[in-house]
Amino acid sequence: MPVQPPAKTGDPVGAIDTPAMVVDLDAYERNLDLMAAYAGAAGVVLRPHAKTHKSPVVALDQIARGAVGQCCQKVSEAEVLVDGGVSDVLVSNEIVGDAKVARLSALAARARIAVCADDAQQVAAYGKAARAGNVVLHVLVEMDAGAARCGVAAGDAVVALAQMISAQSGLEFAGLQAYHGGAQHLRTPDERSAAIAQAGERVRTSLAALQDAGIACPVVTGAGTGTFTEEASSGIWTELQAGSYCFMDADYARNQVADGSNVPQFEHALFIASTVMSATAPGRAVLDAGHKAAAIDSGLPEVWMREGVTYTQANDEHGLLSVSDPVRQPSLGDRVWLVPGHIDPTVNLHDWYVGVRGGLMDGVVENVWPVAARGCVF
């Protein structure tokens, strides 16, 4: 049974039921415009990551501003995107299991579908499914860019897998997946630059090996909201996969930016609207938003625009506030806005986005759209 949205179009902000996931549409659109302009000026392709937003609505907003398509992590996410009108999707992950590979192949009859591989067994399975469906799957070799997660070693292993892909009918070698997830939240610019420079050397090694083997590499894709400027300026990466920039969370906001930097400054655009549900003691208040409303893996939510009020503890359905100044003590029924620590898993907790135009204080609900790929983890 579908869950009713917490607001309807035309409602004032104060009428939004809580907890609710609210998008400040003005800030959100500025973020989309800023990244699109940056990518265009840098001469790189933008392929935003849909694991952040899980929404064809957001995807099409990004594509309308010049993004080539979307990337995602799961076949089910790709299915939702294609159903929603996205015609170019990269599953920036390895897919294992006959049922999932068959679903991926079926999507390739409706859209351009790409996927990653770091093992010959994956390549064989992709080829078998593509031939059975009489489609073409575009396959990228994932190389370990330094995160020590998925991916083959740079150089000869990349060439060997690219050759296997090229030899399989139904498959097309589409390039390199070179994403360094571990670099995204290194706090200082120097740390992030050093990590991406090392990743770049691995990519160069692989590109040289592919060239020696006579294999063209049309795309090098990767990057995230924490490091996209490094990849864009490297002359190596051709495509950016940043995702969180559209909403921005508290953890990415903790990354330091160099003085005088031309790094785009994205705004917080996604918030959890919550209500004080208990205020029985001075210096303390309890919200109706716990860790079922905002993910806490990257830290507790931050209280927005309430000096002296700190979110200090999350339970299933309660969020505890600590108040340092009695004058700022929240009262029962007060609205409190929270900035999640980590956007992606927070989005996956909610059924609806509530889009507000005109700010969080006096704005009006302009649209309500579903988190269409919520729970799409398979």
Image (spheres, helix red, strand yellow):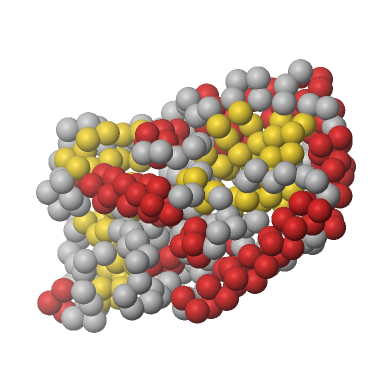
Number of marks drawn: 0
212 horizontally vs 281: left or right: right
110 horizontally vs 276: left or right: right
Q: Nearer the viewer, residue 246 or 281?
A: 246
235 horizontally vs 159: left or right: left
Q: Position of residue 103 (x, y in %)?
A: 70, 27
Assign the C terminus to one quadrant of the image: top right
Instruction: Give the image quarter of residue 182.
Output: bottom right
Instruction: Give the image quarter of residue 6.
Output: top left
Q: Position of residue 338 (x, y in %)?
A: 32, 60
Q: Position of residue 97 (x, y in %)?
A: 80, 37
The residue sitting at 85% across, 43% down in the picture is 163
| Observer able to see residue 103 | no
| Observer able to see residue 302 | yes
126 horizontally vs 180: left or right: right
The residue sitting at 51% across, 69% down in the picture is 185
Residue that sits furthest to the bottom in the current view: 324
Q: Is residue 76 above or below residue 216?
A: above
Q: Is residue 9 above or below residue 147?
A: above
The residue sitting at 54% across, 63% down in the picture is 234
Q: Nearer the viewer, residue 99 or 117?
A: 117
Q: Is residue 328 above or below residue 39?
A: below
Q: Nearer the viewer, residue 223 or 376?
A: 223
Q: Position of residue 333 (x, y in %)?
A: 20, 56
Q: Is residue 135 above or below residue 325?
A: above
The residue sitting at 59% across, 58% down in the picture is 236
